[in-house]
Image (cartoon, rainbow, N blue to C red):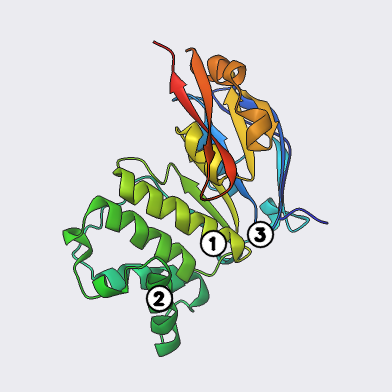
Amino acid sequence: MQPKIRLENIAFGYDEQDLFSGLNLELFDGEVVCVLGANGCGKTTLLQCLNGSLKLTRGSVCLDGKLLSTFSVKEVARKMGFVFQEHNAPFPYSVLEVVRMGRAPHLGFFSTPSEEDNEIAEYALEMVGKLHLKDKPYTQISGGERQLVLIARTIAQEPEVILLDEPTSHLDFKNQTLVMRIITKLARRGFSIVMSSHWPDHALQYASKVVIMNNGEFSAVGPPGDVITEENLKLAYNMDVNILSVNDSKRKRTMKFCVPVD
C-alpha cells in the first residue's frame, strides 16, 4: 500500500543550523499520527514543512507518491488542511461564513460560493455538532466552539490529509474530549491525520501511531503502547513519569495513562 504522505530524510533549520534533520515517516489513509515533544522541539515547524509553508533544507515530502514541491499552492490546499492553534477573525463573520472560507481552494479567482458550497459548509458544521451556531458571530463564541468551527472549516475544504497543531490547547476537559472524538471520527471516514500534542494520554487513547521529537530527531516512532514508555517520556520531557493501567469493564480493554512522579 502506498502511503498518503512519506517523509524522506527531511531537515529544516534557520541560519544554517538545523532545528531537526534525518526525519523519516509514513502516514497511511485513516491513520492518526500524534507528534509529542517538549516546547521548542519543532512540532509546529514540522507541520508547516508537511504542508509546504516552509521550505525544507534537505530531504523530501511526498504526497500520494508525488513530491509535494511539485504541487501548486491551490493543489496542496485541495489535498491538505491545516488547523492552527489559535485563530482570531478580524471581522465579526458569522460561523457559517468562517466555515465557508474552507471552500476557497475549489473556487475560481472571481467566483462566489454556490448553494452547494453552503451545503458543504453546513454539513461540516453538522459533523462537529455546531450547526446551531451557523448564524452566530464567530467572535462571540467560546474558545472550544471556535476550535470545532475551525475543524469544520477544514472539513469543508474537503482535503484528504488534516494537520492539527495542538488542537486541544486552552480547552476544558469536555471540549478536549469532543475534539479528540471528532478526530477519531474523521480518521474512520478515511482522513489521514497528523496532530501535535502535549498530552501523552491523548496519544495513548486516540492515536494509531506516535512520534516523539527530541534533540532534532524522531527518538521513537510506532504504536502508542510501544512508544509511550516511562523511559521515552523522561527523555523527551526531562522528568520522571509513571504509566499506570486500569481495566475498563465497559470497553473491555486495559486503559493506560501517564502521571508525573512527585
Q: Dot 1 lies on which element? A: helix
Q: Which residue is mark 2?
A: 121
Q: Residue furthest bottom?
A: 115
Q: Which residue is mark 1?
A: 186
| Left or right: 79 in relation to 108 | right
Depth check, front residue: 6 or 104: 6
Q: Give coordinates of residue 86: x percent, y percent.
A: 33, 47
Residue located 42% across and 59% down the image: 151
| Left or right: 92 in relation to 237 | left
Q: Dot 3 lies on which element? A: loop
- 113 vs 105: above or below: below
Marks 1 and 3, how far apart in space?
24 Å
Depth check, front residue: 103 or 258: 258
Q: Give coordinates of residue 19: x percent, y percent.
A: 57, 24
Q: Residue furthest front?
A: 249
Mark 1 neighbour class, 10 Å CA radius: few under 14, some 14 to 19, many 20 or more: some
Which is more N-terminal, label 3 or label 2? 3
Quarter occupied by residue 1: bottom right
- Total labels: the figure holds 3
- 22 vs 53: above or below: above
Q: Which residue is mark 3?
A: 71
Q: Are marks 1 and 2 in contact (CB under 8 Å)?
A: no
Specify the quadrant that holds the C terminus.
top left
Depth check, front residue: 36 or 50: 36
The disc labelled 3 sits on which kind of residue? Phe
